[in-house]
Image (cartoon, rainbow, N blue to C red):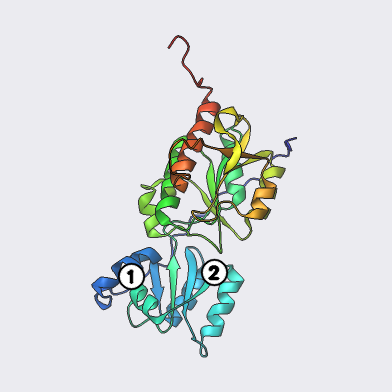
């Protein structure tokens, strides 16, 4: 049964502070693709002192990139600040950092999110303020920024109240994600949580039914999405993780009639998001008399 407890209230934080533009002249033209993948020229802070100050400011700080083997000096402080703020730390090659921020990075760079993150409670409060049952997209370790951006764009258009993504795996709100979302990421709250499984438990407490997109699930046309909905779309390669799969109340599948046995994550998510929207709007699947 669905739990009918009232969701918490909250207001989305809007912190657009601390943005630094590294000098593009130091970046080789051949490195453009790698740099854009990391978040875009305008979304990277480079250098030890600059990264420390950005981590202290918080707000849009996203992921710390350390050169493999970097140690001593302020590196320990950077790692401690990242851990305190819950920001992922990734070890990368010197070449990767050069591509991200030019040669003057001092072994460290920090990507900034293209928009401020919301809290999970903000998303639940948004649904309550609108007098609607929660409609939430959960992206489980989506790694392609274009997939996440497309999912955010479709979720916003379909009337979802927010998107939930993990902190430590999958892409965040990079410039590429923001651009692909066509600006939807500025209008739809995106919560970045430390533990997706715990977030799902909280959604269940708020009366949200959890559906997972999976090839072995029930036919999408036979599923009732009329209540509070949390739709999980799994990663491009591995699908939904085992723990999240166990927490799903129902698995949902799309028919595969051709030779290809899977769909792009954003395409599958888009189809299901609009089926949920159709049911919530009360639009019949077949128009009478046609």
Instruction: Locate residue 152, reporting x and y percent.
Output: 45, 46
- At x 47%, y 36%, the residue is 271
Q: Name the quarter where the C terminus is drawn.
A: top left
Q: Is residue 170 above or below residue 255?
A: below
Give how far across and how far down residue 74 sits, in percent.
51, 86
Q: Secondary structure at mark 1?
A: loop
Question: From what the image shows, is residue 151 above or below residue 223?
Answer: below
The circle on residue 35 is none
User: What residue did someone put label 2 on?
Assistant: 88
Looking at the image, which is closer to me, 219 or 209?
A: 219
Q: Which residue is denoted by mark 1 in the rendering?
A: 21
User: Which residue is outermost to the top?
Assistant: 289
Q: In this rendering, would 124 be left or right of 71?
A: right
Along the horizontal axis of the image, is 274 left or right of 34? Answer: right
Mark 1 crowdedness (10 Å alpha carbons): few <14, some 14-19, many ≥20? few
* Residue at screen point 54% across, 27% down: 279
Expressed as whole percent of the image width and height from the top left, the position of residue 75 reads 52, 84
Q: Residue furthest bottom?
A: 72
Residue under the point 63% across and 35% down: 228
């Amino acid at each position: 049964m669905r739990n009918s407890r009232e969701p918490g209230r909250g207001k989305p934080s809007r912190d657009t502070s601390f943005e630094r533009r590294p000098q593009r002249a130091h970046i080789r033209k051949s490195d453009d693709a790698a740099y854009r993948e990391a978040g875009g020229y305008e979304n990277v802070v480079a250098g030890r002192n600059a990264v420390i100050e950005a981590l202290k400011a918080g707000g849009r700080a996203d992921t710390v990139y350390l050169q493999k083997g970097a140690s001593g000096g302020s590196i320990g402080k950077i790692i401690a600040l990242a851990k305190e703020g819950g920001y992922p730390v990734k070890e990368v090659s010197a070449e990767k950092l050069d591509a991200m921020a030019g040669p003057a990075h001092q072994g460290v760079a920090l990507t900034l999110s293209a928009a401020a993150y919301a809290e999970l409670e903000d998303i639940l409060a948004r649904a309550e303020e609108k007098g609607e049952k929660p409609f939430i997209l959960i992206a489980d370790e989506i790694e392609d920024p274009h997939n996440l951006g497309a999912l955010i764009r479709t979720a916003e258009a379909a009337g979802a109240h927010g998107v939930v993504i993990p902190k430590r795996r999958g892409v965040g709100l990079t410039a590429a994600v923001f651009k692909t979302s066509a600006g939807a990421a500025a209008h739809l709250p995106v919560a970045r949580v430390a533990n997706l499984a715990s977030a799902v438990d909280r959604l269940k407490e708020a009366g949200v039914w959890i559906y997972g997109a999976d090839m072995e699930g029930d036919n999408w046309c036979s599923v009732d999405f009329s209540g509070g909905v949390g739709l999980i779309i799994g990663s491009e390669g591995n699908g939904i993780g085992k723990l999240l799969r166990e927490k799903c109340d129902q698995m949902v599948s799309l028919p595969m009639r051709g030779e290809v046995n899977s769909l792009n994550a954003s395409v599958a998510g888009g189809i299901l998001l609009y089926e949920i929207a159709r049911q919530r709007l009360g639009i019949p699947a077949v128009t009478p008399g046609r």
